[in-house]
Image (cartoon, rainbow, N blue to C red):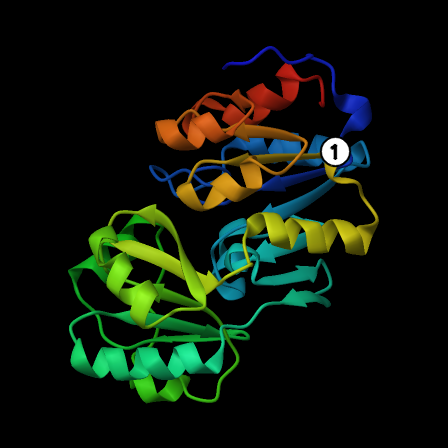
Amino acid sequence: MRRNLPNTVQAMIKAIFFDIDGTLVSFNTHTIPESTRKALELLRKKGIKIFIATGRPKMLMMRAVGNLEFDGYVTLNGSYCFTADHQDIYKGEIPQEDVERLIDYHKQHPQTPFVFVHDDEWFITNVNEAVNDVARLIEITVPPTQPVENARGKNILQIMGYFEQDEDIEVFRKVLTHCEPMRWYPTFADIIAKGNSKSHGIDKVLEYYDIKLEETMAFGDGGNDIPMLAHVGLSVAMGNAAPHVQEAAKYVTTSVDEDGIWNALKHFNVI
């Protein structure tokens, strides 16, 4: 909880963006705290638009939020944005030349799993313990296994790679040259086309709904939230966020398991 900010920002906030894992949803319970559910309900009653901003693909995002209503969605770290009634706002595809180079790379490094997300479908090339670790962490199912060649000719919106950060130089200088990683876990990276990010997706959503950037607020906890937290009008990092993520935010609240969203919204008199 840092930086001197005015407590009352209610009048200026018209839209709030929420990350899912570690922000809306607890890593410990895999559920959304009741205080957060109540806060979202109060925001909607006040006429403040609420949006998801996640690295998850569409199908896993919908499963995570359940029956909660949102006004729109920024998914795949900003690569795919759509409205509450599933009308597309923006899609940012990975260039086919990068996909082709990754197909060749995987043939030389078959032990490294990659997930390819296209439209509402996804598949993984192979499964190892790193894949199972991440699946357990955020309580998701492992994608179906398919040959890497099945990525050819698809409109790939995001790739997920299960490799450590010290391999980034080789992968992104030689293979995925038009892409960049969004890391939130040591052995795993969301990979999107350069220029895409949660902040870019937010801009596309704000343009669609005619909302100004200074009228926005966002909550996040992971490395892939940093572009969003550095971009919006009022950014809040969860207490469970790493120090470098907290540093990107204007305010640090308590953890997701300690009613962090509720506490920050009350602190700023938004609810």
Residue 114 seen anywhere in this rendered image of the structure: yes
Q: Height in image: 135 above or below 24?
A: below
Left or right relative to 74: residue 240: left
Residue 38 image position (x, y, % from top left): 63, 31
> Is residue 152 found left or right of 78 in the rendered image?
left
Q: Is residue 270 left or right of residue 140?
A: right
Choose top left, top right, bottom left or bottom right for residue 26. Answer: top left
Left or right? Give the position of 190 relative to 253: left
Residue 237 percent location from the top left of the image: 49, 29
Residue 146 can be seen in this image: no
Residue for point 17% across, 75% down: 109
| Image vertical order of residue 186 relative to residue 152, above or below | above
Element class at badge 1: helix
Q: Which residue is mark 1?
A: 214
Q: Position of residue 187 (x, y in %)?
A: 24, 53
Up/down of 189 relative to 231, above or below: below
Residue at 21% in and 53% down: 166
Quadrant location of the C terminus in the rendered image = top right
Amino acid at pointer 1: Glu
**Dot 1, how many residues are within 10 Å of its Cα: few (below 14), some (14-19), or many (20+)?**
some
> Nearest the camera: 256 or 244?
244
Which residue is at 47% across, 54% downward?
55
Q: Nearer the viewer, residue 126 or 91?
A: 91
Which quadrant holds residue 236? Answer: top right
Count of labels shown?
1
Work out whether residue 19 or residue 97 is closer to the camera in this orientation and state it: 97
Q: Which percent across, then down, holds residue 131?
A: 24, 61
Residue at image position (34%, 56%) is: 189
